[in-house]
Image (cartoon, rainbow, N blue to C red):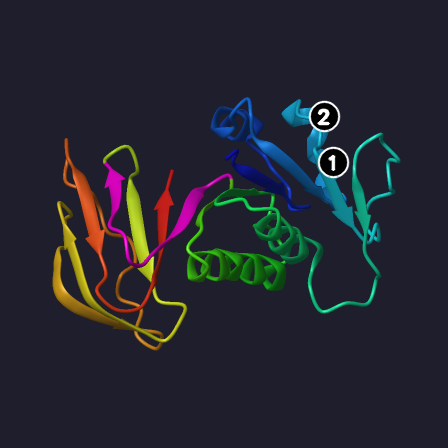
Amino acid sequence: MRRCVIAGGADIGNYDLIRGELRPDDYMIYCDSGLKHMEPLGRKPDLIIGDFDSHADPHLAVETITLPHEKDDTDTVFAAKEAVKRGFDEFLLIGVAGLRLDHTLGNIYILLCLDSLGKKARMIDDFSEMEMVSSEPAAVSDKYPYFSLLNISGCAKGISVTGAKFPLKDAEITCDYQYGVSNEVLPGGEAVITVKEGRLLLIKVF
C-alpha cells in the first residue's frame, strides 16, 4: 500500500527538506490552500479536498471533493478520515503546523487519532518531526539535536528512555506536568522510547 501524504495550508519555508521526505509513489492529497505547495513540491495531486475558502478551486482533471464551509471537520481532518476509508495505513502530514495555533494543535491530534486506529503517521514542519509513541518502541538518532516527549492524552505510564542524556525507567508523565522536554541523544548512538500504557507525542527537533 502506498503512503498517503496530506498537504495543509500552513507555510513551508524549507521545501528541500519536505521534497527529501517524499517518495515517488506517495498518494498526494492537497487540502484547500495546501494547493499552494503543489508547484514548489513538484508533485501533482491524486486527490484535492477543501471548501475553497482560502484557495480557489483549480478545476484540475483530478478527483476533487468539495466540502461545505460550515462543518465539524477541518479540511485536513476530513482528508485524514477519507484516506483511512480508502485503506491507507501510513501517513505523512506536511504544511499542517504554522502560525494558527488552533489549527496546529488540531492537526497534532490527527496523529493521535491515526495512532488509535493502528495507523503509522508522522508530521513534519520546518523545525521538527512529530509522531506518536504507544504500543511500538520509537527510536531517535543523534542527528537530532533535541527530542521531547509530551503527554497529550491523559496519563502515560511505564515510560522508559534509554540512550539519552536524561534516561527514564518505568516513569509516568501526566498532562499537567510535562517534564520530558529537550532531551538529548547520547553522541554516536540512538535513544529508544517505550511506553507500557498510554501515548506520548515524540517531537524530534532538526
- Does the magenta stretch mainly form a helix, a strand or a loop? strand
Task: Reply yes or no: does residue 132 show up in magenta.
Answer: yes
Identify the amino acid type marked 1. Answer: Lys
Q: Position of residue 151 (x, y in %)?
A: 35, 67
Q: Are marks 2 and 1 in contact (CB under 8 Å)?
A: yes
Identify the amino acid type marked 2. Answer: Glu
Vertical comparison of 75 with 142: above or below:
below
Seen at 78% across and 50% down, the residue is 50
The residue tagged 1 is 36
C-alpha separation, residue under disc 2 versus residue under disc 1: 7 Å
Number of the label disc, if any, that sits on residue 182 = none
Left or right for 138, reference 205 = left
Vertical comparison of 7 with 151: above or below:
above
Left or right for 130, reference 70 = left
Seen at 16% across and 68% down, the residue is 171
Q: Secondary structure at mark 1?
A: helix
Q: Position of residue 97 (x, y in %)?
A: 56, 50
Vertical comparison of 84 with 145: above or below:
below
Magenta-drawn segment: 126-141
Seen at 40% across and 50% down, the residue is 131
Q: Secondary structure at mark 2?
A: helix
Q: Residues within 10 Å of mark 2 (few under 14, many from 20)?
A: few
Count of number-bearing discs: 2
Q: Nearer the viewer, residue 45 or 88?
A: 88
Q: Position of residue 136 (x, y in %)?
A: 27, 52
The residue tagged 2 is 39
Vertical comparison of 170 with 111: above or below:
below
Task: Reply yes or no: does residue 128 show up in magenta.
Answer: yes
Q: Position of residue 7 (x, y in %)?
A: 63, 41
